[in-house]
Image (cartoon, rainbow, N blue to C red):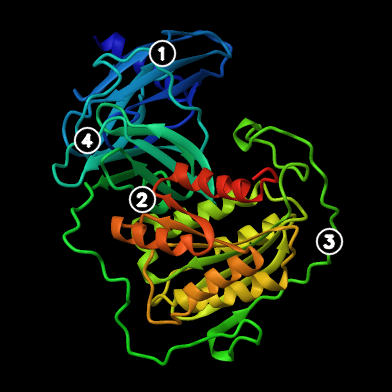
Amino acid sequence: MRIVFSLLFLLTPFLVNGQVTVEKKVHNFGDLYPNAQTYVDIKFTNNSDKKHFLLTLDKPRDVYYIFSGKTLLPDSSIIIRLKINEGRKGKFNHEVDIYFSDSDQPTTIRLTGNVKEVGGNPMTACPDFNNNPPPNNRNEFAITIKVIDSLTREPIRRSKVYVVQNNDLIGEYYTNKDGIVHRPFPVGYYFIAAEKETYITNLKEGYLNFQRNYIEIELQQPPIEDAPPELIADFPEEPEIIIDLNDEPPEEIVEEVVVDTVPEIVIEEPVVIDNRTLAELPDSLFDQAHFKTNNITFILDVSSSMNPSGKLELLKQSMTNLVTILRPEDLISVIKYSSNVSVVIDGLSGADKEKINERVAALRTSSSTAGGDAIQVAYRINRKKYSAEHNNIVIMITDGAFNKGSKTYLETIEKNYKERGILFSVVGIKTSEYVTTHMGNVVSKGGGSFIQVRTAEDARTKIIKEIKRTSFRGR
């Protein structure tokens, strides 16, 4: 024994200065939910010109491992996969000591994290290399999205999840039997909406990163309406405001005006000989031969009633998707309204997509709803760009709550439709049954349509379909 200890003492200086290096010694799993990633691959490299061996691992009972090999030839590597047991809730801090033949001191790997919810895991108790971990990209991380019933707290399988960033839809996914979508995404600010038949669509938004990687979305069954909701907002009585469309609007109605100077575009309207119906045309077709030049004035509701349930985001997404198909000859004007009316865009060309999207993205909700006044101003702006050869249309996007602003809007809608053919359509964002019926009556005065938007899919397609329908030359 004395001889053995003497030999170890003599060899110790050489064994401590080992030649096997490790790529990292600490791994934080973050917050763990069902179906989350619970294993990590650690690479060990032999930087010497001698052969070395993996000897043993000293680990806690809640850590499992496999290795790709035990022999490290010169300038070669092996992988050791470490998996934690997520069967118990709470924080964990495990140390795994790994011994190689080049040193009598272990390489210690620390595994930390917090099991927030216990659930099934795609890996068995003994991990294998048939499951590949996500690429080692520090800018991407795995997020877990769980969709549940708001009343029973049970997971909702096959619910559809939309992930939106910077007003762009970057993915559509379906939840599994546990109500979960688990996918990698870059760090950033996201809007995540979930929908399912018989439920009301709901949305969560926020900044997601490695530590904030779990989103739970509750879906609620629609309430039974006992009585029609009141369309008139409750705020102090003010004198009725009537706008003569032949005169300038009163100063107090318009808070801010962004004037966009657009050179006049002279367009020769083509003569089309085509017997195909709109339904027979390809979805991607939006040319001058089949569709008139558009003069579109949008009235956007940014009142406080548009804040809950992701309504404002559906409004923005509807606008952003329409902008993608606009042509340079198309003209877009945008009015926003809450307690006051503001002109956001005054006749920008469809070529100015970035400028239009920037101004729509900057919209925020506030105060009550001056919808009647906004309609008056919108028609005045639309008439400034009016051409009998164009598709002249005013589109209001709202959840349907009007206040005690001007009540002459119905007369304005009907008069402009009969005398000039200016259409009036309404996009209802998650409107109730009663409001839907009311808005149907409003659009009938202006020859347009009521378009109901409840989901991200509706936002992506329905306004585009309305513009194509109204501008189609064969209509």
The residue depicted at 35 percent of the width and 24 percent of the height is: 106
Name the front one of labels 3 and 4.
Answer: 3
Q: Which residue is mark 2?
A: 203
Per the image, the residue denoted by label 3 is 265
Q: Amino acid at mark 3?
A: Ile
Height in image: 166 above or below 234?
above
Q: Between disc 2 and disc 3, whose residue precedes?
A: 2
Q: Quadrant of residue 49?
A: top right
Q: Which of the labelled discs sits on residue 155, or is there none?
A: 4
Front residue of 287/446: it is 446
Residue at left offset 40%, top offset 53%: 205
* 436 relative to 475 in the view: left or right: left
Mark closest to the chain's N terminus, 2 or 1: 1
| Residue 101, label in figure | 1
Q: Position of residue 295 (x, y in %)?
A: 68, 61
- Disc 1 marks a residue whose amino acid type is Ser
Label 1 residue SS: loop
**Nearer the N terminus, badge 4 or badge 1?**
1
Point out the image quarter for the N terminus: top left
* Circle 4 crowding by C-alpha within 10 Å: few under 14, some 14–19, many from 20: many
In terms of secondary structure, where does tag 4 sit? loop
Q: CA distance from mark 3 to mark 1?
A: 79 Å
Q: CA distance from mark 4 to mark 2?
A: 16 Å
